[in-house]
Amino acid sequence: MSGFIKQCIGIDCSKDSFHATLCTMDRDQEIYFTKVHRFLNNNSGFNQLLKWVRQNQKKDVPICYIMEATGVYYEPLAYHLYKTKKSVVVILPNKVKHFMKSLNVKTKNDFVDARAIAQIGVERKFNLWEPPTPLFLELRQLTRLHEQLQCQKVALQNMLHSKEFSQGTIPFVLKTNKKLIKSIETQIEKVEQAIQNLIEREDWLREKMERIQTIKGVGLMAAAVVIAETMGFKMIRNRKQLVSYAGYDVVERQSGTSVVGKTRISKKGNRHIRRALHFPALAASRFDEHHKNIYNRINERNDYQTKMVGAVALQRRLLLMIYALWKSDQVYDPQYQKSSL
């Protein structure tokens, strides 16, 4: 039997190339690295990586390939490795950043990053990466395009407002701004129709979305964003993980009597979900009696210092309701209240 118990290929990806190193751990928990190698970020480089791994890996020891989710540059390699039946792990950059801090590593470059990624791979346990379902990937592209267009529309409306009140703005400028806003509104309508068509294409998805929309305040777009960003809750194992994924987990900073920070949500999660649930939460606080009571009770407890505390609590609650209805295939029942929601 080999004296090694684990091995991992740490990969740091960039636009044109990626750096990789092999990290191995023996039975005494000692860690060893190979020299860091640079490969081109294309099919030729992917095949060279696999050839190099075959020449250097320890036989009869499980091996995985671990990389950061650096924009979109990691995707071609991740898909290639997955198609060749390799064990792939994709982690968030902040995990590597905090891991390097714990090791007191002060230098940051491609070589150091590759070694740190490989080391965290042998020292920690991660879930294997799977490519998203094409249906949800298409839905996510459409919902993010919708969000992008909405942001552009708001920006143009704000600019138009300032120009209308500005002294001496010529009519041509105002007319052009209005045309741009109208054009974006047309594109928004087309994207919304594309989202509707995509959902109706699959009967099972349409039925699930209709059940979710029985929650007061939650419309098609909000439901579509949540489902698209979570890929149909494919990798979500429990409610706690979902709350953390969306950035609704509570962060407390307190130590003894000298350090007393404000309790807040981390916001270290999917901002698209939080943005999508903002207005549904406000609508629920006005038109759903139960949610209205919760909203008022939370704000009373905080002496109405900021109404966003109650709004954020409702956002979290709506997210968990969407998750529950998706999993149970039930419609929203206002009489069914679960204290942990």
Image (cartoon, rainbow, N blue to C red):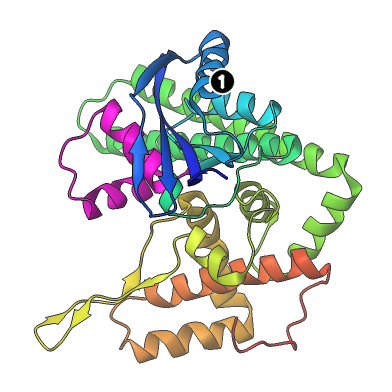
Tell me which residue sits at (91%, 48%) in the image: 203
* Residue occupying the far top of the picture: 44
> Can you say whether 100 is above or below 334 in the image?
above
Residue 50, x across and y down, in percent: 56, 20
Q: Is any atom of residue 136 visible in this view?
A: yes
Q: Is mark 1 on a helix, strand or loop?
A: helix
For the C terminus, the image quarter is bottom right
Residue 172, x across and y down, in percent: 37, 17
For the N terminus, the image quarter is top right
The secondary structure making up most of the magenta span is: helix
Closer to the camera in the image, 242 or 190: 242
Amino acid bearing label 1? Leu
**Image-quadrant location for residue 62:** top right
Residue 26, x across and y down, in percent: 43, 48
The answer to whether residue 159 is left or right of residue 298 is left
Would you say residue 328 sits in the magenta stretch? no
Image label count:
1
Q: What stretch is highlighted in magenta?
A: 91-120
Closer to the camera in the image, 316 or 1: 1
Tell me which residue sits at (23%, 51%) in the image: 103
**Image-quadrant location for residue 208:** bottom right
* Residue occupying the far right of the picture: 203
